[in-house]
Image (cartoon, rainbow, N blue to C red):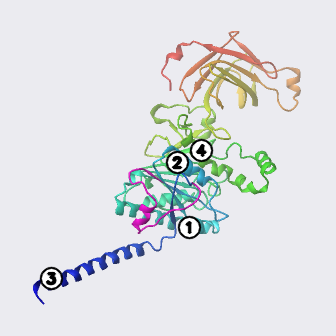
Amino acid sequence: MDSRALLLVVLGVWLQSLTASRGGVAAAGRKDFMDIESKFALRTPEDTVEDTCLLIPGIAESVANCHFNHSSKTFVVIHGWTVTGMYESWVPKLVAALYKREPDSNVIVVDWLLRAQQHYPVSAGYTKLVGKDVARFINWMEEEFNYPLDNVHLLGYSLGAHAAGIAGSLTNKKVNRITGLDPAGPNFEYAEAPSRLSPDDAEFVDVLHTFTRGSPGRSIGIQKPVGHVDIYPNGGTFQPGCNIGEAIRVIAERGLGDVDQLVKCSHERSIHLFIDSLLNEENPSKAYRCNSKEAFEKGLCLSCRKNRCNNVGYEINKVRAKRSSKMYLKTRSQMPYKVFHYQVKIHFSGTESDTQVNQPFEISLYGTVAESENIPFTLPEISTNKTYSFLIYTEVDIGELLMMKLKWKSDSYFSWSDWWSSPGFAIEKIRVKAGETQKKVIFCSREKVSHLQKGKGSAVFVKCHDKSLNKKSG
């Protein structure tokens, strides 16, 4: 055999061994991911419901076949515990809203339904494995395609929020953001940070808490803050429109098929608040930092200085403090959820000392755009010559405030003392601060001093000028 023939044989053997070894690497690559049970479906704007195209870790062709957009951001949606073993109705709604807001993005839905339909403590334990699956998938995307993790936003609901947290703690580099949508409470309230969602799991972690009713560890949603910014709509315990009366109405209208929706109503509200933020981008709801929901109910926290207020949902400002920011807001009972918050301060004067408890009032606000009449509120206590602050909110934007009316309502029960003489207080001015605009307005009585009497007519106050209006708003 001449030297040229020998060279060709050697070259042929070398090429054969090279292709074999490459195939072996590919095969080994696939074997490396064979134990991943979670599935990763890239849904499309045209089909937000079905998992028609799967991204398979270890198989690069699957990414090309699904038309993954390497130059755009990626949302990874992780569902929670399921009784039925099927996706809940919110999944396609969230997918559609994400695509509407970010048309060029990739929206991946993680399917861990088999593990999620077990007895709750078993499924809760599986969040570690699901988180590991998601992290390995993300790491593979970064290693195989050089896909930047700064483009990755994980959104996890209930148990899925903790799976997202675990995934974030296991990626080679930190993902850009994790949004926890009412992270599950049972088995996680007292868990250490590595076993649940925590601020260390992404560059920025924001959390919506919507169903924290009950004792810690027993509430459906986790009570303690677990992100950089933790938002508690309506105090976080329970959401408007999710009460028993509403339950009876829904059953009457739609039958018993939607009973599970009532159980999940407050829990799932976290998702719908986020969807609302995607669809109503011009009008984001505002949340306000506060030490307690009791202080928020007194209207003491409507400041936007030094990052004390923030947008809810997608357009949140990524503020990372040393410790978590607890923030509060009120919402409507349905989309759009945005309301307009006001702090009202009233000084009750009088010549005779008097204290009343749990008193019902109504306030009406009139502005340049609209009005909001007969807003009910209760003051736990009112005493002579004391100032009280409280929070009210309107469902409509009334514009610049011009006038307000205040009415002290009669008790729902008969009171002999009120029958003989109607209690009353003198009010000169009412101070109002608007949360959304940060404007302070002072209202003066039309008669210089208004005498507000229980069960009698409304006292009218009009916008007036005062030196304190020129002070810097706080």
Residue 464 lies, in percent from the top left, at 60, 12
Q: CA distance from mark 3 to mark 4?
A: 70 Å
Per the image, label 4 sits on a secondary structure element best described as helix
Q: Which residue is mark 3?
A: 7
Q: Earlier in the sequence, mark 2 or mark 4?
A: 2
Instruction: Name the mark on residue 273.
Output: 4
Residue depth check, mark 2 versus mark 1: number of the one nearer the observer: 2
Magenta span main SS: loop
Q: Which residue is mark 2?
A: 98
Three-letter residue code for mark 2: Leu
Q: Earlier in the sequence, mark 3 or mark 1?
A: 3
Task: Classify 10 Å Cα crowding around label 4: few (below 14), some (14-19), many (20 and above).
Answer: many
Q: Earlier in the sequence, mark 3 or mark 4?
A: 3
Badge 2 vs badge 1, beta-carbon distance below 8 Å: no
Residue depth check, mark 2 versus mark 3: number of the one nearer the observer: 3
Q: On screen, 322 above or below 115? A: above
Q: CA distance from mark 3 to mark 1?
A: 60 Å
**Nearest to the observer: residue 295 or residue 395:** 395
Q: CA distance from mark 2 to mark 4?
A: 13 Å
Three-letter residue code for mark 4: Leu
User: Which residue does the image show at 67% across and 50% down from the upper left?
Assistant: 213
Residue depth check, mark 3 versus mark 4: number of the one nearer the observer: 3
Badge 3 vs badge 1, beta-carbon distance below 8 Å: no
Q: CA distance from mark 2 to mark 1?
A: 29 Å
Q: CA distance from mark 1 to mark 4?
A: 28 Å
Badge 2 vs badge 3, beta-carbon distance below 8 Å: no
In which quadrant will I find the N terminus?
A: bottom left
Three-letter residue code for mark 1: Gly
Q: Would you say residue 183 sits in the magenta stretch?
A: no
Task: Classify 10 Å Cα crowding around label 1: few (below 14), some (14-19), many (20 and above).
Answer: some
